[in-house]
Amino acid sequence: MTTSAGRDRGRAGPRRRTVLTAGAVTAGAALTGCAEYGDEDGPAGSAGPAEPPPATKEQPDTATPAPDEGGQQPSGGEELADTADIPVGGGKVFKDREVVVVQPEEGTFKAFSAVCTHQGCIVAEVSDGTINCTCHGSRYRVADASVAGGPAPRPLPPRKITVTGKSIRLT
């Protein structure tokens, strides 16, 4: 004969298992989330904090550049700007292409990813010798995109450009 205490124990078992299983699943998900989004010593094989999306889209440029005065197609990819559009000691952010072009010194043009290495925001502006992300205050030096301040953990990655005449092209 089964007593009421025996029935209660039988009913409590499955409920307890359900609660314990749900708790273990929740704890595992929380630990995985922490390791993936900021734990430098994440799970085995982890490369550290989550990386921002790549700045380059591995897709071929489909735009065909306009021919130059001699009827020749210019080399390189999509035209971003005229060299006169990029101030010496400053630069310009091309948000739609996720690239920032700078001219650290007269006649020297460089390009970097415009994706902040802190949280993946697009940098907002170039002023006073730095490339600035207004999301969390990261700043990068115009000369080499190294971190000048803020929470950014590493420099902006370089992007390839070609300068032909007065044309700056993303390649």
Image: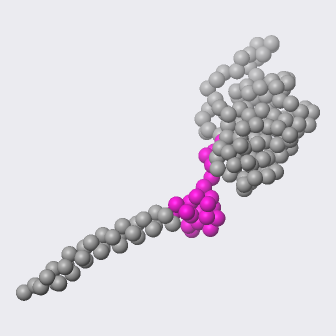
Residue 40 in magenta?
yes
Q: Position of residue 154 (x, y in %)?
A: 74, 54
Whether residue 102 is visible here, answered yes or no, is no
Horizontally, is 25 left or right of 86 in the view? Answer: left
Q: How is the image coloured?
A: one colour
Q: Residue at x 74, y 16 (%)?
A: 67
Q: Residue at x 75, y 53 (%)?
A: 150
Q: Position of residue 17 (x, y in %)?
A: 30, 73
Furthest toward the right, the residue is: 106
Q: Nearer the viewer, residue 169 or 26?
A: 26
Q: Residue at x 71, y 41 (%)?
A: 123
Furthest toward the front, the residue is: 4
Relative to 116, residue 110 above or below: above
Residue 122 in magenta?
no
Q: Nearer the viewer, residue 82 or 121?
A: 121
Write down the region rendered in magenta: 32-55
Q: Position of residue 18 (x, y in %)?
A: 30, 70
